[in-house]
Amino acid sequence: MLKKVIIIGGGAAGLGAAYKVRRAAEAGHDVDCILLEKDDRLGGKLATDIVRDAEGGEYVVDGGSDAFVAGKPAIGRIARMLGIAEDMTPAREENKKTLIVKGKRLIELPDGIMMFAPTKLVPLATTPLYSWPAKFRMALDWFLPRKVRWAEGETAQDHDETLESFVVRRMGRESLDRLAEPLVGGVHASDPAQMSIAATFPNFLEMEQQFGSLIRGFLAERKKREEMRKKYPPKPGAKPWAFFNTFYRGMQELTDRMADAVGRERIRTGAHVETVEHVGEGWRVTLAGGEVIDGDALIVATEAWASTLLMRGVDDELADLLASIPCSSSATVPIAFRAEDCPFDTKWFGILSPLVEKRPLLAVTLSSSKWPDRAPEDRVLLRGFIGGPANQHLLEATDEELIETVRQQLVELLGIKPDAQPVYASVYRWIGGMPQYTLGHLDRVDEIERRTGVITGLELAGGAFRGVGIPNCIESGERAVTKVLGDIGITYEEDTTPPARTH
């Protein structure tokens, strides 16, 4: 008898789940799925628009995530299954440079900085990014003892602390304010004073245990990377390796192709789920308007706040746990100018603006330099980022006000001509879109998983639990499928071992 899995949410996690259900069906299992997405588009926070320029050419604009990191294999694996691996595009490493705002200056990230730890003495000594007392304080990491030695079997989760506590303890306040906060906290749009380091960067705690020092740990990691490059030199004609990668026509290509592989007939957009119920051995979903859909299993792949609403009445304690995961909002503002209005060096990827600078802009990406073929030759395409826990009030502005805020900041920071007006601009708002991994997050997630583990045919997926990156979201959807299929008597395993690196 054919089993049906209902999936709520059409982002990377939901589509990752639906695609795995379809692979199980193609492997001969009696199972199918229906995916319900409340918005009129699929992809979640992967949103790509191809925009024509009035004078010819086009922009490839990512309104959400514009990249994935090479070290996480899920996207490469899925791309190979979908036949779009050749569309994966590395960042233009010749332009790789990060600039940090300090006062009215843009200071290049010093060579040898790995995350926020210095691994080269001369660049640290000569950079104007830090004061001399801060430089000496950072160097002390080499000598400072571990906070505590873990007992056998203990992990980072047993010794969780905030990012602020950890960085200040190891490297001092200025290291946090000038780089760790915008670089590490910015990835998660999080407040370092609340951010769980065990849930976000457990490797920092593990380095401290193994090496007694972050600097020593990152030096060992740098040596390992260099050995890998020697072991796997680039093959003639192969794509160059890069830490950041995307798809040639934008990140939404990935979710679009996943949706095609699932089968568009199994996907419904504009389908707002109002309630879910555990009915007998199955699940019932009621849509706005009263339509009822029954299935044998249910995967909820939405933001934490949306999952909270759906779990009320199913398991109130589970709903309370989900409600304890805060979510912050942000906006991405792509904006393009004529090249003649941009008299600055364009050989860089991005700008980070620390919170201590008290600017409305968190970061900037220079898309037309970071990626190939993102804008016409005589245009400069950038993306400004506004939001984060400290700047939620800024999102009350209109789209026009946000665009003007970004324009003014770019004039101040980059020297764009003061009267230059964008030839293209848009705003992508992500309301409640970024889960906050606050102190104790992994303990909460363990309890969430314990509660869903005993509810037959139910699982949660998405970025709210064990990783906010797109690969993490896809894998969470796939794990959810394994769980619910097992609940309904279907065992489906896949070999997800990545192929050996050849470049």
Image (cartoon, grey):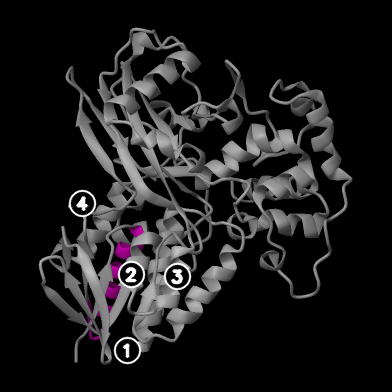
Q: Position of residue 179 (x, y in %)?
A: 64, 35
Disc 2, SS: strand
**Pointer 3 local density, CA inside 10 Å: few below 14, some 14–19, many at least 20:** some
- Compute the Cα span from label 2 to label 4: 18 Å
Q: Quadrant of residue 320?
A: bottom left
Residue at 34 percent across and 73 percent down: it is: 312
Q: Which residue is mark 4?
A: 41
Magenta span: chief secondary structure: helix
| Disc marking residue 488 | 1
Residue at 25 percent across and 56 percent down: it is: 257
**Amino acid at the residue labelled 4:** Arg
Disc 3, SS: helix
User: In the rendered structure, are the residues bearing label 2 and label 4 in contact, judged by CB atoms less than 8 Å apart?
Assistant: no
| In the rendered image, the vertical position of residue 353 relative to residue 23, given as above or below | above
Q: Which residues are magenta?
A: 12-32
The image quadrant where one finds the N terminus is bottom left
Mark with earlier residue (3, 4): 4
Q: Which residue is mark 2?
A: 300
Q: Is residue 485 magenta?
A: no
**Amino acid at the residue labelled 1:** Ile
Q: Is residue 242 visible?
A: no
Residue at 43 percent across and 14 percent down: it is: 411
Horizontal side, residue 244 vs residue 250: left or right = right
Q: Which residue is mark 3?
A: 320
Q: Position of residue 409 (x, y in %)?
A: 44, 20
Disc nearest the viewer among 3 and 4: 3
Residue at 10 percent across and 66 percent down: it is: 289
